[in-house]
Amino acid sequence: MKTGKQPAWLDNAIFYEIYPQSFCDSNGDGIGDFNGIIGKLDYIKGLGCNAIWMNPCFASPFGDAGYDVSDYYSVAPRYGTNADLKRLFDEVHKRKMHILLDLVPGHTSVAHKWFLESMKAERNEYTDRYVWTDSIWEEPQGMGCIRGISDRDGSCAVNFFSHQPALNYGFYKPDPAKKWQQAMDSEGAKATLEALKDIMRFWLRMGCDGFRVDMAGSLVKNDEESKGTIKLWQNVREFLDSEFPDAAMVSEWGEPDKSLQGGFHMDFLLHFGPSHYNDLFRCEEPYFSDRGRGDVSAFVEKYLENYEKAEKKGLICIPSGNHDMDRIARGIHGDNLKIAFAFLLSMPGAPFIYYGDEIGMRYLENLTSVEGGYSRTGSRSPMQWDDTNNAGFSAALAEKLYIKTDDSVGRPTVAAQLGDENSLYNEVRRLIGIRQEHTALQSRGEIAFLYAEKNAYPFAYLRSSEKEKILVIINPADRETSFVCGYVPKEKIYSLAGEISVTDGKLTVPPCFAGYYAV
Ligand code: TEU
Ligand code: CA
């Protein structure tokens, strides 16, 4: 498949993930909204982020926080109107920023009109829109299903929770004994794909700059090697290249060798899947903990494998976290968060900062699930702007809030960190500034790992562009360490906590350190 031109704005993109429910409430109903986000765009730009990913904002019964869409063409009234969203796009563009909506292609809510129609016994336009078996007594193997709520004699596969029926994009290898398994080129599967493109077209024409694509690898069934799903997304990429060449798609897939083959401009490394991303911040002994008992070698080995297989077809994106993961500050503390960002902001691909991670927002323990969040709810608490009512998130009564605020002593807030040169916020802002001054550190700069030994510290890699080569040294451990890498720093670009020393080519690195050096 020819890979189309990559949108130039991705070359130095730095994304900020906004969970719309929890970012800023402008009308005092306890839930974040578009006008609240518009009022905070200058904050996001001031941090240095030039792109936004906003979680789903469409009509939904909110059984899964909006990942259960009931109308792809209307925004949920709790956030505002379609016109308000258009204004958000315009305000983002006025600031020379870009915004991705969250596209949920694998499933809808059971409340979606398509599903209600597909439940009818009589054949209609939506009979084949979902994956239904042809008998209530047969369940689709290994997919979970909804059954017994329709006049239609069948069971409907689900894609995630049991209220999220799986849309029909066909089976890569339909089982001949199961007539209900449609091929990818069946009329029903093709109609679903065209409906998906129409949804994308609608929002792209309104002004969004692309999509984060939910569960991107889940669409084609019986597709063990994802060959069918890759083919499907190549079809979508060709549509984008011809109609919206500057639009970008980032996949929630976590296998860049497949997703980038499929034509995604970017893929995430995630807390599930084969990337070893969890070894960095979210495991028993995270590499970035100051206990220094972690191991970065498996992450690097898998990263290199993906980097080579992706053949520069797109970007591999490493997030600080997201709405599905524990907050990074749950396992990484104090200045080690600065070291984590020195890593995140010096790796290839576009960095993604989850709202609040830039000030070290904490994971709220033992919250009751809200809108299907379960253990993810603790990572979705209201943004902490200041120490006024509800941390400046909302004027509503506390009991009206979407999720309770972190009311613990010493909770981080934007107000407390903006003016503090030593705050995490200002370290992140500085690191973003440095990245934007050095093409070698940006999305498409090359990377060569120089030191990433098993159960060892530090971690060192070389970033390079035509203009420059930058040695990055990361030592989260609370002990001095040393290594040889064949490069000797010429000029310091950045250092956190002390200075390295060089003796006969051996570099000695202070504890809890990060540094960037021209070589
Ligand atoms: O997530 C898919 C997914 O696999 C993760 O939710 C993961 O399984 C879970 O967090 C446990 O680690 C996407 C969205 O990001 C998520 O918020 C939705 O709930 C899900 O899809 C269904 O749309
Ligand atoms: Ca509101």
Image (cartoon, rainbow, N blue to C red):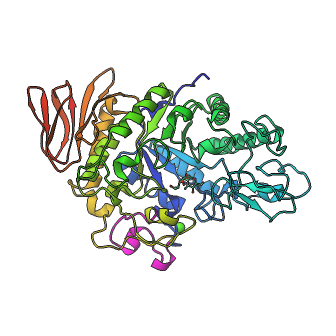
Characterize the magenta stretch by its predominant secondary structure: loop
Q: Nearer the viewer, residue 513 or 466?
A: 513
Q: Quadrant of residue 239?
A: top right
Residue 459 spot, x, y in % from top left: 26, 38
Identify which residue is drawn at 47% across, 30% down: 8
Q: Nearer the viewer, residue 132 or 13?
A: 132
Identify which residue is drawn at 39% across, 69% down: 392
Q: Note whether residue 426 is visible.
A: no
- Judged from this view, the residue extending furthest toward the left is 503
Identify which residue is drawn at 60% across, 65% down: 78
| Residue bounds of the magenta highlight | 380-401
Q: Quadrant of residue 40?
A: bottom left
Residue 241 spot, x, y in % from top left: 62, 29
Q: Note whether residue 138 is visible.
A: yes
Give the side of residue 241 with respect to residue 399, left or right. Answer: right
Identify which residue is drawn at 66% across, 65% down: 61
Residue 112 spot, x, y in % from top left: 74, 58
Residue 144 spot, x, y in % from top left: 69, 56
Image quarter of the C terminus: top left
Give the side of residue 406 with respect to residue 399, left or right. Answer: left
Q: Nearer the viewer, residue 378 or 91?
A: 378
Is 5 above or below relative to 368?
above
Residue 400 lies in the magenta-colored region: yes
Give the side of residue 372 with respect to residue 163, left or right. Answer: left
Q: Quadrant of residue 148?
A: bottom right
Residue 182 lies in the magenta-colored region: no
Is 413 above or below relative to 245?
below
- Judged from this view, the residue extending furthest toward the front is 177
Q: How many marks?
A: 0
Image quarter of the N terminus: top right
Q: Ligand 1, what quadrant?
A: bottom right
Is 284 above or below relative to 481?
below
